[in-house]
Image (cartoon, coloured by chain):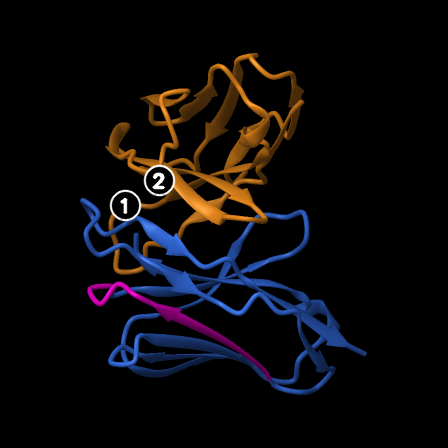
Chain colours: A blue, B orange
Amino acid sequence: QKEVEQNSGPLSVPEGAIASLNCTYSDRGSQSFFWYRQYSGKSPELIMFIYSNGDKEDGRFTAQLNKASQYVSLLIRDSQPSDSATYLCAVNESNSNSGYALNFGKGTSLLVTP
Amino acid sequence: DAGVIQSPRHEVTEMGQEVTLRCKPISGHDYLFWYRQTMMRGLELLIYFNNNVPIDDSGMPEDRFSAKMPNASFSTLKIQPSEPRDSAVYFCASSPPATLLNEQFFGPGTRLTVL
């Protein structure tokens, strides 16, 4: 069973601060990495994806990938109370028939306090 | 675009009853996924289809669970007989034809409670 590990939190940060969310994975063959945001009682929605080592920035979000360390992270700059949600890390399953299956972590709960 | 549609949104049933969950994927998407989410186990992939054909059902917990996709616009997940440990939120997701970004779009989910 391929593992995707996240700290469950809650991670509490003050408004305007940087929130740092981390994820490790065990499948060395994985090539695609995703961050989903899930508000309480709602369905997951994709906010970032990354395929190559290094950083990828999109607005206030930056995804970081280190395949050698099997580590992916999400930084949220200028955190807002509306960012309070659970953040799910997802990694493609390398040995699935098409590589389309995703393994999800259990998520990190983020709370941004005003 | 309507997004992924799931029904019912909530289902309460008694142990031993048959439960059928339904999903309509986004038009033009040829991948469909069924997930189950619980606090203990997180989001688990149960089965996925490509062009209506089941590709990987290794996540289906046991023979009580079955899934079908008779056409490109409809899929069902059936539990027979249901048990209290099946209580969870069941999500359906769909994905467009193979691209580098295999973004999955999730439906609103069905909250199942088995008493």
Q: Which residue is drawn at 61% across and 86% down?
A: A18
Disc 1: CA contacts within 10 A as few (<14), some (14-19) or many (>=20)? some
Q: Which amino acid type is marked by label 1?
A: Pro
Which residue is the site of mark 1?
B97
Rendering coords of residue A87 (x, y %): 55, 64
Q: Residue at x 66, y 69 (%)?
A: A10
On the question of residue B28 being in view, the answer is no
Q: Mark 2 points at which residue?
A: B29
The magenta region covers A19-30
* Residue A97 percent coordinates (x, y): 18, 44
Q: Total marks drawn?
A: 2
- Badge 1 vs badge 2, beta-carbon distance below 8 Å: yes
Give the side of residue B21 with respect to residue A112, left or right. Answer: left
Q: Is residue A10 highlighted in magenta?
A: no
Residue furthest to the top: B17
Q: In which quarter of the image is residue B11?
A: top right
Residue A34 seen in this snapshot: yes
Secondary element type, mark 2 = loop
Residue A44 versus residue B11 in the image, above or below: below
Q: Judge by depth and name the residue closer to the eye, B47 or A58.
A: B47
Residue plotted at (28% across, 49% down): A100
The span from disc 1 to disc 2 (Cα, nearest Å) is: 6 Å
Q: Residues within 10 Å of mark 2 (few under 14, many from 20)?
A: some
Q: Which of marks 1 and 2 is nearer the N terminus?
A: 2
Residue drawn at x 24%, y 49% as measured from the top left: B98
